[in-house]
Amino acid sequence: MKRLTLATLVLTAGLALSSVALAHGPGGPKGPPPPLGPLMHGLQQLELDADQQLALDDTLAEIEATRPEPPSGRRGPPDGERPTREEMEGHKAERQARAEQLEAELAKADPNAGWLHAQLDGGPHGAAPTEAHDHLDLLLGVHALLSAEQRATLVQDLAEGRARHEERCADREGPDDRGDRARRRE
């Protein structure tokens, strides 16, 4: 009996750790793009019943098994093509509005899947791979199992995470942090 309990504990801890690693995705802590990344991370933070947790674990295993390899080499545009801080500030209101719309959609029992899929394709890297759309559908299947209270908690957690992110960005010093980091690497 003790062996079974210990084995269950080890298996549960392993799944939990792999779920956390999966939430970070191929890009490290940034993880997959919205809405995929925030939804995946938010679902992992919720207190779920046994059936919901099993559905989430199965979904995360499926995502891990079908996740494309991360791109090799440097990600993002070359330094000369990166937006300036002023350009990024100009897009801040747009990003804020999209994040708020994402939260509003995820508060619904039946979010607008078409809008969510469009957000995957509307990022800076263009159309998302087919796997990303499949992963979003899998996560929306778990979302459909949530109670109204769990959806409210999910949305609150997403909004708080967004506020923490904005606070970290505001705390950065210097006129162009990316330029400073690039100079330090040289």
Image (cartoon, helix red, strand yellow):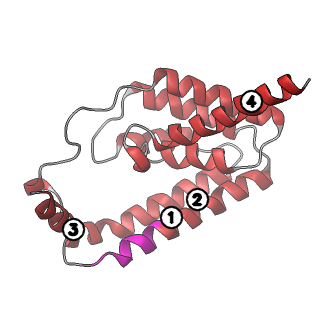
Circle 4 residue: 54
Q: Tell whether 118 sits left or right of 72.
A: right
Mark closer to the chain start, 4 or 1 = 4
Circle 1 residue: 162
* Residues in magenta, as a range: 165-173
Q: Are marks 2 and 4 in contact (CB under 8 Å)?
A: no
Q: Residues within 10 Å of mark 2 (few under 14, many from 20)?
A: many
Which SS class for mark 1?
A: helix
For badge 3, the amino acid type reads: Glu
Mark toward the viewer: 2 or 3: 2
Circle 2 residue: 158
Structural distance between the alpha carbons of marks 4 and 3: 43 Å
Q: Percent from the top left, x then y, of residue 18?
A: 57, 35
Q: Are marks 1 and 3 in contact (CB under 8 Å)?
A: no
Residue at 66% x, 25% y: name it.
58
Circle 3 residue: 87
Q: Nearer the viewer, residue 163 or 4?
A: 4
Mark closer to the chain start, 2 or 4 = 4
Structural distance between the alpha carbons of marks 2 and 3: 25 Å
Q: Is residue 169 magenta?
A: yes
Q: Percent from the top left, x then y, of residue 69?
A: 35, 26
